[in-house]
Image: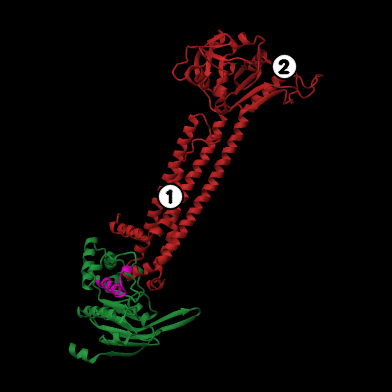
Chain colours: A red, B green
Amino acid sequence: MFDLDKWQEILGTMRKNKLRTFLTAFGVFWGIFMLVLLLGAGRGMQNGVQREFGNEAKNSLWIWQGKTTIPYQGMKPGRQIRFTNDDYEALAREVPGLASLARRNRLGGEYTLNYKTKNGSFPLYGANSTFFEINGETVLKGRFFNPNDLAEKRKVMILGRRAREVLFGDSIPPIGKYVNVKGVYFKVIGTYELDGGNGRREERSYIPFSTYQSIFDTKRRVNLMGALAKEGVSAAQVEEGVRKVLAARHRFSVDDKQAIGINNNEENFKRFTGLFAGIEAFVWFVGIGTLIAGIVGVSNIMLIIVKERTKEIGVRKALGATPWSIISLILQESVFITALSGYLGLLLGAGLLELMSIGIRQIEKSGGQAPYFTHPEVDLRVAIAATIILVISGAFAGLVPALKAARVKPIEALRAE
Amino acid sequence: MITLKQVHKYYSVGKNKLHVLKGLDVDIQEGELVSIMGSSGSGKSTMLNILGILDDYDEGEYHLNNTLIQNLSAKKAAYYRNRFLGFVFQSFNLLSFKTAQENVALPLYYQKVGRRKRNKLAMEYLEMVGLSDRADHTPSELSGGQKQRVALARALISQPKVILADEPTGALDTQTTQEVMDIFKEVHRKGITVVIVTHENEIAEQTDRVIRLRDGIIESDKVKQEELTVKE
């Protein structure tokens, strides 16, 4: 029920007691404002870390060549292990739980990518299509390799965003153009983007693995392999299978962890998940602390207000105010102030985060990057819930002394100074 | 209008009980102008607070306007205070953050009278006490006498049966004291019962009846003869 008279009474009281109103309002405002900033900063950190992690498939592993460190079957340690197409095929054939297998080689030596008069010193790789699935590249324009590209060893190329920018600029569409590497011309069929690594991952260009081997490397070598586990199979299981097959083929001990390098993304991801949980727990811990500080502040001010108004309550009672009219007057005032200032804190906090977000986006556009921090944002439901909790607890804090004040005999209230 | 029968009041001070009112019997008729006198500690303020339902009593009976005032709920007490009684205090007890007009209108707010009517009536009562030009001033901008006149207007606006005043001139100089007393007398002429607690003889002399309290007992209860003869 809306009681205009009561609201006029409340607004009048607030207008005439500006300092008191301001102090209460500021306590609530500050609590919510800090909470929103904190939650936003926590999320920004989480987003930042997530970005560093990139888009790699989480249930995958990378396998690279190493040196043996354990004597095995009469062979000395320090032997270099080298992969070939045969290893790749053996893994595809023999490792259980494997969804797909990727391979990638990097072209060594001095060379540049050239388009007309433009050139760039960017690395060239040969890879199969599965590689992109594991590494996480996404198509910007055109397409990735199809089976025919690989089967027919077509001279086609996929460019990273950065390489495209340098070779073609913004005005020339790269698809269908020819890029010259070491005198060989490759037709550009697609461009990609990939998060992480401060943009260096977008400097790379790829040609089909079969094309790469036939032009640049006739020894059928394979430098890096990637394995993607089937749905429901853990990457650790696949890792074990890979180790077993390669150990048998290259005759090193299965326990020799240095003979081949394996990077298990699943385990990395688990570590990151742990880190996220840690950040989240920390943010909540500090956030709840801030909220409690806010509640204590509001309660404190409410207590003082009721104490300060004891005499006024006595006068009102002598003039015929019922206890309920006293309680509702104080409560409505406190709820009104806390709700309004809480909302203001919410608005300003969210606004500041949005400004930060815009600022960071500007910096990122111009090529810079804030390490481990991006896109701070706040879960609006959490912030609103916090505001409501603060309003309710502020009202509750006022309720106890208000009830007490309403119960006091008017003569005692009148005597108060 | 007001009947006290063997009213006792105790205050507990620590473990001891202080017997403040020791069986008062008072009967005040409608339209009387009565002063209650006594030295400090005689129980005169306590008596006034009981009459005003601001405090409760321990034994006896108190009838106000033929209603027994005993063990009332806070809501009922508020209702009787609002309808039957008007208060004037020594320290004025105006709300400092409200204007004179708003202060005067406050009892009507608790009677749920509409705002426009409230403010109109408040203006009329301010005019009656001669302060209509100070309607927009807050208490801090008023002199002591003006404050007390505002308090009187506030006490009168609800058209009470009884005006209770606790040392209403205690904080005022001689001239303003007389101004305030004149208003009390005017109120009395309109037929409203007025009870004034005071320790000043000049005040008591201007009332029709003087009740003297001493140590919680009525020492004397004198009705002025000449006033009575004039009335009859």
**Where residue A405 appears, x then y in whole percent?**
41, 66
For the residues labelled 2 and 1, the Cα–Cα distance comes to: 66 Å
Observer able to see residue A53 = yes
The stretch in magenta equals: B139-156
Q: Which residue is mark 1?
A: A388
Q: Residue at x 61, y 17 (%)?
A: A104
Instruction: Answer with left or right where residue B108 lies relative to residue A379.
Output: left
Circle 1 crowding by C-alpha within 10 Å: few under 14, some 14–19, many from 20: some
**Of discs 2 and 1, which sits in the foreground?**
1
Circle 2 crowding by C-alpha within 10 Å: few under 14, some 14–19, many from 20: few
Q: Residue at x 45, y 42 (%)?
A: A352
Closer to the chain start, of discs 2 and 1, is 2
Residue A34 counted in the magenta span: no
Checking the image for residue A249, the label placed there is 2
The answer to whether marks 2 and 1 sit on the same chain is: yes
Q: Chain of mark 1?
A: A
At label 2, the amino acid type is: Arg
At label 1, the amino acid type is: Ile
Instruction: Answer with left or right where residue A98 lies relative to residue A246.
Output: left
**Where residue A154 appears, x then y in whole percent?**
54, 9
Which residue extends farthest front? A117
Q: From the viewer's perspective, is residue A116 above or below residue B166? A: above
Q: Nearer the viewer, residue B41 or A172?
A: A172
